[in-house]
Image (tube, rainbow, N blue to C red):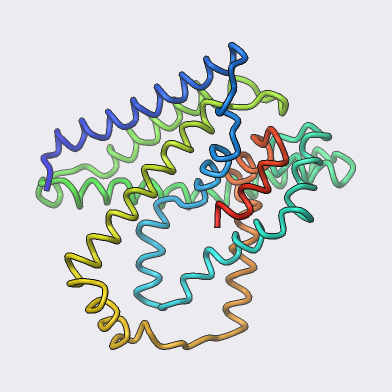
Amino acid sequence: MLSFNLLITICLSYVAMLFAVAFWADKRAERGRVGWVRAPLVYTLSLSIYCTAWTFYGAVGYAARSGLEFVTIYLGPTLVMLAWWALLRRLVRIGRTERITSIADLISSRFGKSNLLGVLVTVLAVIGTTPYIALQLQSVTLSFEVFSAAEAGQIDGDNTALLVAAGLAVFTIIFGTRNLDVNERHHGVVMAIAVEAVVKLVALLAVGIFVVFTVGGGVGETMARIEASPIAEWNLRPDRWVTLVFLSAVAFICLPRMFQVMVVENSDERHLATAAWAFP
């Protein structure tokens, strides 16, 4: 367990590092030295924004309750990436041609650039994503409570969530909303997401190794425990699996953050070919 002050220091240092990375990438792009800032690997890593706190908490809990059914959350995006030539490539081209900056712009442009339809989609997106953002903030406060040595109730979850939301707003204002031109890429944001993707990957691998070799007692014993548990039972319901795969595929394309990174921030449609095999 960590002291609350030490935990705050670590979190602020991490956020400062992301700010520094985003600032460096923006300055490098302004000087025309994009180089590997526009590399296919960076674009592929930025797609990991699909995996949020829901991955750390929700997917793990879902797997514990439903076994292999949790895989459907990732089968949908995998199928979308495999179909990049027919689907994503066309989305990127439409976005570049129509100068689209959001999913609302895309839907509006396909129906005669209807402002009313664009407003309706935006309102629905706000209504739909607000509870989701609240869950993300709640997961952050839960993480503070789990890793902090402070006693239960000593950490004000509301204030923690407010500070995190304020920090995210500042980051978005500085690096995300300065230019809404579709031809102007937000290199700083994409690079920060890519760096964060590496951190998340290392963290997940570290936790997995710890669970298998420390908690589980090794690969053999861990596999034996899995086989003896209800999780190993293949209670497949085709209708439910198809529905969940379809919903996750739609979410992968239509979530505002995914559309922004995958379509709007795409600087070269050839990057999709790399992401098609590297992201899954």
**Going by the image, does 146 lie left or right of 63?**
left
Residue most toward the top?
31
Front-most of 147 and 112? 147
* Residue at x-position 31% and y-position 32%: 14
Question: Percent position (x, y) of residue 178?
Answer: 59, 20
* Residue at x-position 11% and y-position 40%: 3
From this view, report whether residue 153 is shown above or below residue 246: above
Front-most of 160 and 234? 234
**Going by the image, does 251 lie left or right of 105?**
left
From this view, report whether residue 11 is shown above or below residue 26: below
Question: Percent position (x, y) of residue 39?
Answer: 59, 34
Q: How many marks?
A: 0
* Residue at x-position 72% and y-position 59%: 83
* Residue at x-position 35% and y-position 59%: 57
Question: Percent position (x, y) of residue 161?
Answer: 33, 40
Quadrant position of residue 248: bottom right
Front-most of 147 and 210? 210
Q: Quadrant of the C terminus?
A: bottom right
**Going by the image, does 189 lie left or right of 228?**
right
Question: Percent position (x, y) of residue 216?
Answer: 20, 72
**Going by the image, does 87 lie left or right of 59?**
right
